[in-house]
Amino acid sequence: MKRAWTAIGAGAVVVAMALVVWLAPTGYVLRAPGPAVDLLAGTSPLLVSSAGTTVPGADVLATSMDQTGQAERVSLPRVIDAYLQPNHDALPRDAVYPPGQDAAGAAAAHEQVVATSREAALVAGARLAGITVLERVRVAGVWQKGPAYQVLYVGDYILQIDETPMQAAADVPAYIQSSHKPGDQVVVTVLRGDLSQKVTIKLVGSSADGTVPTLGVTCDMGYWYTPRVDVMMSVDRGDPAQGLALALATYVLLYPGATTPGVVAAVGVVAPDGTVSDVAGITEHAASAWAAHATTLLIPAGNCAGLARTYPGMTIVPVHSVSEAVNVLSVTGAPLPHC
């Protein structure tokens, strides 16, 4: 009898240990196809043209990929389920999120990457539509207790200081430090939206001894053009892989007579010069497009090899640039290159 109870106790321990292993967090991140959004639909949360342009009958889908967050822990059953399902992936956590990065750091890094990638995509689409895009000095940050607080704002463009043109971000501190001292006043010509205005700011000292003058802002280079297209969805829900779709939708909105041959989905990271780069999770993005009934999917040429299956009724076309993607939109009747 004693042996029986010993066996039962040992079995219970084994079962308990198995349950712990089965339900314990693993070091994996899961990926799955997400919903696709039509960027040219009247109710789209993503794009709106400042010119109020609409393109009836045109469809550009932005695909998406659902990915477990940096702070979310994934159990073994979910990992096994992802391996068994088509168009799903389970990846080592360190391959997706940098080791030691906390949730707040991951969110901040993601938002910065998405904001930068969106701007690049919109610029590429506008340039291809024939819109003149100018690079200008832009306010990237304002000291909360500095002299420019609530006078200059993030996103303002600094055109001139005291009638001296600012051509590069470094021109702002260089001009102020070479020509002024703390306590001096400068007149800054600012472009905010489509309106230019002059504001007067009294410089303060930024160094330990208070002798180095500053406006109390940090600057970078931004892009200005009009009319323009803006992304209305928050950056935390964005993905750099939506760049090609954003560029194409921008082109269709701004180029007179542009349209799409059927329902076109696109995925790819886009640079301001229109170059298209590979994305992670191409299988999930392709499945997202297919579920949304896309007839054509444009993907980075380098991602062709990563597609493990075909999608009936959807032609997958590799491209190297936004201009190449636009050429695909204009093709009628001729066969398209495909993966």
Image (spheres, rainbow, N blue to C red):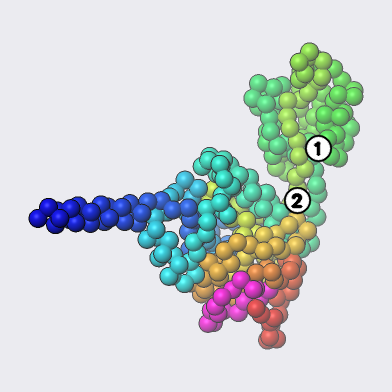
The three-letter code of the residue at mark 2 reads Tyr
Q: Is residue 127 left or right of residue 116?
A: right
| Label 1: element kind | loop
Residue at coordinates 66% horizontally, 80% vertically from top-left?
338
> What are the residue bounds of the magenta stretch?
304-318
Res 197 quadrant in image: top right
Image coords of residue 267 (percent x, y)? 62, 65
For marks 1 and 2, the one nearer the N-term is 1
Q: Could you tell me residue 211's position as x and y percent?
A: 82, 15
Q: Secondary structure at mark 2?
A: loop
Mark 1 or 2, closer to the camera: 1
Residue depicted at x 69% and y 57%: 121
Q: Answer left or right for 63 relative to 208.
A: left
Name, please, the residue furthest toward the left: 1
Residue 106 in view: yes
Q: Which residue is mark 2?
A: 225
**Which residue is nearer to you in this view: 15 or 111?**
15
Q: Residue 317 colored magenta? A: yes
Q: Is residue 337 magenta?
A: no
Q: Residue at x 9, y 55 (%)?
A: 1
42 above or below 177?
below
Mark sitting on residue 169: 1
Q: Is residue 331 above or below residue 218?
A: below
> What percent of the width, then of the height, locates residue 196?
76, 37
Q: Which mark is residue 64?
A: none
Question: Callout 2: few (<14), some (14-19), or many (20+) C-alpha neighbours within 10 Å?
Answer: some
